[in-house]
Image: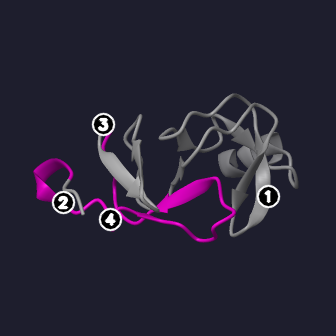
Amino acid sequence: MGSGPQGRETAAAVLVLNPEDNVVVCRRDVRAGESLVIEGEAVVARADVALGHKIARRLIRSGESVVKYGMSIGSSTAEIQPGDWVHLHNMKSDYIPTHTRDSRERR
């Protein structure tokens, strides 16, 4: 198992919830440039990603489903590279409009 910045173990950095998933969940804050080993494959984090957020484990093409828990949780709105942070800037829910969620948060 490799070490990341400051000697942190990278094996514990992310969690694969289901083998079908194209994203992993951060178990701690991950720094841009950090090398992550995901089921034997190295992926470099392309941005700082906070605890609990998602990182792409493989290429997700624009319009393709974002899969977490073995199920689609939405669709990508742009091509997402391995190691990219996956969030509302590059994906949308297929179940509730994103603009509705934003308007509720502003009240």
CA neighbours of label 1 inside 10 A, class few (<14), some (14 to 19), many (20+):
some
* Disc 3 and disc 4 in contact, CB within 8 angstroms: no
**Helix, strand or loop under label 4:** loop
Query: Measuring 53% from the left and 67% from the top, which residue is drawn there?
Result: 16
Give me the disc on residue 72: 1
Residue 27 is inside the magenta segment? yes
**Helix, strand or loop under label 2:** loop
**Helix, strand or loop under label 1:** strand
* Disc 1 and disc 3 in contact, CB within 8 angstroms: no
- Ranked by sequence position, the earlier of labels 3 and 2 is 2
Give me the disc on residue 8: 2
By what rule are the colours in the image chosen?
one colour
Query: Measuring 37% from the left and 55% from the top, which residue is drawn there?
Result: 37
Q: Is residue 65 above or below residue 8?
A: above
Question: Magenta segment range?
Answer: 4-32
Q: Position of residue 20 (x, y in %)?
A: 69, 63
Q: Residue furthest left?
A: 6
- Ranked by sequence position, the earlier of labels 1 and 2 is 2
Q: Position of residue 28 (x, y in %)?
A: 35, 62
